[in-house]
Amino acid sequence: MTRREPLNREKVLDAALALAAEDGLKGLSMRKLAKTLGVEAMALYNHVKNKTDILDGIAERVYSGVEPADPGAPWPERVRATVLNLYRALARHPVVPMALATDEANPNSLRALRPVEDLVGALYEAGFDDEGIRQTLGALNSLVFGSLLLTTAGFTTTRRDEAGQDPYLRRIDPAALPNFSRALPALSAVHPERDFTRALDLLISGLVAAAPSDGPAGP
């Protein structure tokens, strides 16, 4: 008889991430997770508290894997690197941004918050005050999560009819909507990371222009 390796928190999170990736957030349950691991559901509670704890653990793992920016680089480069690396880490596990956006996960450990700490430090160095930090983080988070949700939740999926045409496009009247009709081919050509990077660069250009010129803001 093959001896089963002891269960631990990391193995539970590994299995949960794989299950959620396959079945979505709604498909992740303690019962199904236990079945995947070949144990009774009660055995999971020795390692995780509940589904929320599992989702927090998965999100923490993704955040802790975000590659840090070079601490010696200028603040705009650090902001760009941190945000782009966060986007890439979350894009590898689409279920995680969905859990964060729907408030099903909200990790607050040191490992999870390190990228945010680095980002806020760069913005303070730029001279933004507390209110400026709040507004800037909101803009950056909106870009990251908005981009991820648009490209992972079906918004960019092209549907075809039996003739191989997009029924949505066929309903657009070019005479009534000439500008939108002209832009549609470009709007349909989605390149997620390239589009995100372009938007991020535009946002950072705005931050550079808006940054106070008198150095780091005081407490």
Image: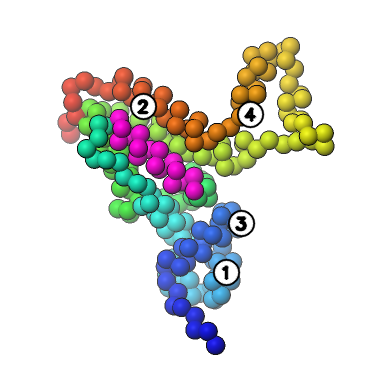
**Residue 219 horizontal/vertical position (percent):** 17, 34
> Which image quadrant for residue 40?
bottom right
Secondary structure beneath label 3: helix
Q: CA distance from mark 3 to mark 1?
A: 12 Å
Between discs 1 and 4, the one toward the N terminus: 1
Q: Residues within 10 Å of mark 2 (few under 14, many from 20)?
A: some
Name above or below for residue 104 compared with residue 141.
Answer: below
Give the residue type at disc 2: Ile
Which residue is situated farthest in the right direction here?
162
Give me the residue at 37% from left, 47% from top: 66
Give the position of the N terminus as an image quadrant: bottom right
Between discs 2 and 3, the one toward the N terminus: 3
**Residue 57 horizontal/vertical position (percent):** 42, 58
Secondary structure beneath label 4: helix
* Camera-nearest residue between 85 and 154: 85
> Is 147 on the left-hand or right-hand side of 184?
left
Magenta stretch?
76-92
Give the residue type at disc 1: Thr
Can residue 56 be seen at all in this image of the molecule? no
Q: CA distance from mark 2 to mark 4?
A: 26 Å
Magenta: main secondary structure equals helix
Q: Residues within 10 Å of mark 4 (few under 14, many from 20)?
A: few
Q: Name the residue that disc number 1 marks.
A: 36
Q: CA distance from mark 1 to mark 4?
A: 39 Å
Between discs 2 and 4, the one toward the N terminus: 4
Give me the residue at 76% from left, 24% from top: 171
- The circle drawn on residue 23 is 3
Give the residue type at disc 3: Asp
Name above or below for residue 5 compared with residue 96.
Answer: below
